[in-house]
Image: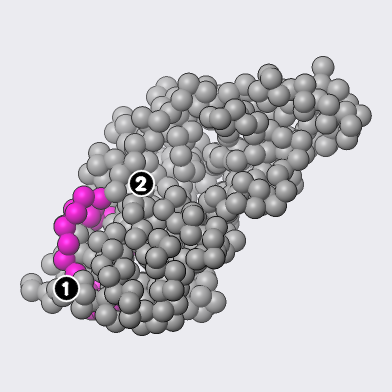
Amino acid sequence: MMYNYVSAEEALSIIKSNDRVFLHGSACTPNYLITELAKQSGRLRDVEIVSITVQGEIEIAKPQYKDSFYINSLFVSTPVREAVNSDRGDYVPVFLSEIPLLFKKNILPLDVAIVQVSPPDQHGYCSLGTSIDVARSAVDNAKMVIAQVNPKMPRTFGDSMIHVERITKMVLHETDLLTIDYSAKVTEDETKIGQYIAGLIDDQSTLQMGVGTIPDAVLSSLHNHKNLGIHTEMISDGAVDLIAKDIINNKFKGINNNKTITAFSFGTKKLYDYIDNNPSFAFMDVSYVNNPIIIAQNKNLIAINSAIEVDLTGQVCADSIGTYQFSGIGGQMDFIRGAALSEGGKPIIALTSRTKKGVPRIVPYLKQGAGVVTTRGHIHYVVTEYGVAYLYGKNMRQRALALIEIAHPDDREMLDKFCYERFKAHYH
């Protein structure tokens, strides 16, 4: 079947000044069209760009395009971080599970959605590929859709299909997908954290892994487990070998049995090749995947998420360094709550005791201006390379002492001083 492909210039000409434009994210970031859009900056003013986790070089986020494009991020990633923390952009605090509602309920009405898709099949359906997440809602609710059609985009199953008749303009552009190899970046301390968390995971558990190196460290420590399942917002390479060995087989989840449930994937070509045309994966709208009511229907749901810092009462900052917006709320609270409500579930916050620069991450107080993503009422397990602290049901004094126990040894004296000043209790 012949389709009417147009040039990038023609496709992007439908965008007008003052429009709100959605950009597909992660491995699906349509960098070719974004770069072409920058070339039209001269005719555009005050175009609002909304997205989550865009990757690669985002040309329109550069200072010279300030008058043309405003970066209003729903989850901040490296390429737009500088813009979001300047007068060229801003950040919307929102649970990942609720971003689709912002589009659906016209709280953030979309004029145009720019996505990257697989080529149409014999029925005229393209796939949203590796990132369904909030893109499903974006293409369903935007007035117009521009699609970068990429023959290298994996074809995924679940909520990912979009018919060519729903696409306003199609641009054919073949390019390699953006990749990241988390396993190559795992440190010795993160490996220890992975081993501690593996000790908290029973056979027949269902796993959620957040973004980063610690989830891959956990997955690499699970090769002696049996009959695990996956219900997660994001999947990376670490899961592939476990699925191939039938360690992850989704038999005992209690909901969506025999399916690996995810909202998006980001990893290497090995991962993308594995999910391509693989019906054992269901890539679903994040309003479903991250709905705590759905999450809680999985048995023994183990939620593994990271943090920037944790204070001595168990407050978790995961989205900012003081007032500097680093990432976003994302799906952490969705899964922390869902896991807590799951039969046998365990919500886990995992972090190294110090940053790579030696800055303590278990602290007396969060930095001034820091965002609390997981409250002290929601916290259960905190894991560092020094062990596991279980905070649920513990009072403030007990929490402080448990957290000092897993802090960096060189930070414990400082933390003990604050602990005594506030709670009149000494560590040991």
Left or right relative to 322: residue 167: left
- Circle 1 residue: 7
- Percent of width and height locating residue 194: 50, 27
Residue 27 or residue 297, whichever sits in front: 27
Q: Earlier in the sequence, mark 1 or mark 2?
A: 1
Say if the magenta span includes residue 155.
yes
Q: Secondary structure at mark 1?
A: loop
- Residue 342 appears anywhere in the view: no
Q: Which residues are magenta?
A: 151-177
For residue 102, above or below residue 353: below
Which one is nearer the viewer's eye here, 22 or 413? 413
What's under tag 2, amino acid-wise?
A: Phe
Q: Could you tell me what secondary structure mostly forms the magenta stretch?
A: loop
Query: Which disc is residue 266 wearing?
Result: 2
**Tally of numbered discs:** 2
Name the amino acid type tagged 1. Ser
Residue 164, which numbered label? none
Q: Quadrant of the N terminus?
A: bottom left
Nearer the viewer's eye, disc 1 or disc 2? 1
Q: Is residue 416 above or below residue 105?
A: above
